[in-house]
Each structure stands twice: as C-alpha cells, then as structure tokens.
Amino acid sequence: MTAPVAALPLEEPMDYRALVMKLIAKRWWILSSTVVFAIASAIVAFTMAPVYRATVVLLPATDRGSEAAAFASSPLGGLASGLGLGLGPRDDETDEALAVLRSREFIERFITTHNLMPILFRELWDSKTGAWKADVRHPPTLGKAYRYFDSRICQVTQDSKTGLINLEIEWTDRYEAAAWANTMVDDLNQEMRSRALAQAKAAEGFLNEELQTTRTMEGRDAISSLMEEQLRRRMLASVNPNYAFDVVNRALPPDPDERVRPERALMIFAGTLLGLGIGVAGTLVFYAMNPLSQVSPRARNSHSSKDPGLKSRTT
C-alpha cells in the first residue's frame, strides 16, 4: 500500500495592491529619477553636434557603351574579350567602378589627397601647431581613418530597378558633406579615366606587335579593327570627364534643420522612460533588500481613504 502523496503548497498570488502601495510610498524617488533622466537626455540632445546627410545621385555612363556592346557581340568582340582588351559590357565597368569607390585604396587616397585627417579627428588636432596634440600618445592612423570614413560617413547604394546610385556623406558640417560627396565622384571618374587610358595604351602596344607578325589579310583586318576600337576608347576617356558615372543630381548642402541625428524628441522620450524604469526598479530592489521595511502609515492611510473596501478589510 502506497503512502498518500502530500499535497504541494500552492503559490501565493502576487499582492499587486501591496506593490502599488510600495511604489506610491517611494513616488518622490521615482519622480525625481524620471525628471533627472529627462533633463539629462534633453541636455545631451541639444548639445550634441548635429549630423547632416548630403547625397549625390549617379547614373552609370552606358550611352557611350552602345557601340562597344554591338562590337562585343561580333566575332572580333569575342577575340578582344579573350585577349582581355576591356571591350565587354558596360555593366562590368560599372561594377568595377563601384568596387573602386568602396575600396580601401581609393578612400585612403581620397583622405590623403584632400587632407581630411585633421578634420576627421578634429578633437585630437592642434590647429595652432599644425600637428597632433601633445597629449595624444597614439595619433590616428590612415587605416583608422578609412574604417571610420567607410563605416560612419560614406555609404553607397544602388537601386536594382532604376540603376541609380546614391553616394551619401554624413557629417557634422553640411557644406563639407556636400563638397566631399561631389569631390569623391570627380576623383572616381578621374581614376576610371586613368585606368581606361592605361589599358587602351597597353592594348594598342600589344596589337601593334601582333600586327607586325601577322601575315594573313583576315588577321591583319581583325587586329586593325581592334586597334580602332581601342583608339575610340582612349578618345572617350580623354575628352569625357564623367567617364564612369554621369551625375544626375550633385550634392547640395542640406538646410540647417535637415539633420539626420540626433532625433531630439526620441532621445528625450527614451531618457524619460529610462528614468521611470530606473526609479521603479530601484524601489523594488530597495524593498527586496529590506523586507522588514514597512510602508509609511501616511501612504497607507492616503491609499486606504481612496479605497473604502481596503479600509474595511484592514479593520
């Protein structure tokens, strides 16, 4: 015969009324915490340096690639592609230009060329001496500047439907943000022009050597056509400043009230909620660490006077 199983004690339900009374007893602490955090968040929100966003809209320069696309579909285009003479679709050149724009080498050269190190790390730079401040033990490196610029300042996005590319610069100076965005596009077009000229020149040298050793008329005609296409490519790169991207909208300085951050109203609201939460949590921790603490009679009486049912139950 098995022994009867002892009934497990039921958990006592939480006394929400007692909890409310404890919070009311510490209402001034909760209110003080809420007010202090609300004021602190407001001070931070209004003293933080505003950040602005300047955007330049780009379109891949595909119009001058129409003849190259037609040439690429011909037998000579296949031969040129096999030789690596850069006569493929313009989409490949656009992808290359975007890769260059995001590359560390290009961004570091942009920072160095335009002397942005003292601007990016302005709080560490002594403008009077033209050097890093004496108390800076480890001056920022170019690699650190690249990571900061790539992760916090510059962003490149492309719309898959329209093909438009947005280059966005976020910075505390709205005029500098617009200038940097436009200058980056100009530098990128110049970089892609230089690469195209170098590739065309190398291809022409290679084709000249092949022309000297080719004896068949068909081969010489094919090489001559390839040389003409390289000459055309070199001409386009020489005369067209917007070789990789056409600028649809150049970046303009945002208005003073068009800041990206801080969002002051959201910061103040979040700070107020944080202060309220800390006040409530602090009250609960206080009573948990001091279980013998009693709610003051004044708070109990004031709460009881508002609830006749509680008064009758306590008596």
Image (tube, grey):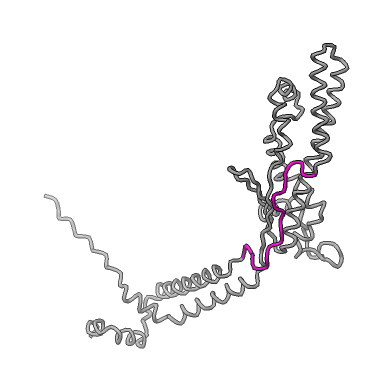
Q: Is residue 40 left or right of residue 282?
A: right
Residue most toward the right? 212
- What's the residue at 47%, 79% (across, down)? 31
Q: Position of residue 157 (x, y in %)?
A: 63, 48
User: Is residue 301 found left or right of 133 in the rendered image?
Assistant: left
Residue bounds of the magenta highlight: 241-261
Spot occupied by residue 120 in the image (x, y as percentages of width and height): 75, 59
Looking at the picture, tell me which residue is in the foreground, 291 or 281. Answer: 281
Q: On screen, 157 above or below 255?
A: above
**Quarter of the rendering containing residue 280:** bottom left
The x, y position of residue 268, in whole percent, is: 55, 71
From this view, report whether residue 289 is shown above or below residue 220: below
Residue 14: quarter of image:
bottom left
Q: Left of 201 or right of it: where is 245?
A: left
Considering only vertical position in the picture, is 167 above or below 281? above
* Membership of 266 in magenta stretch: no
How many labels, in total?
Answer: 0
Question: What percent of the width, then of the height, locates residue 47?
Answer: 65, 72
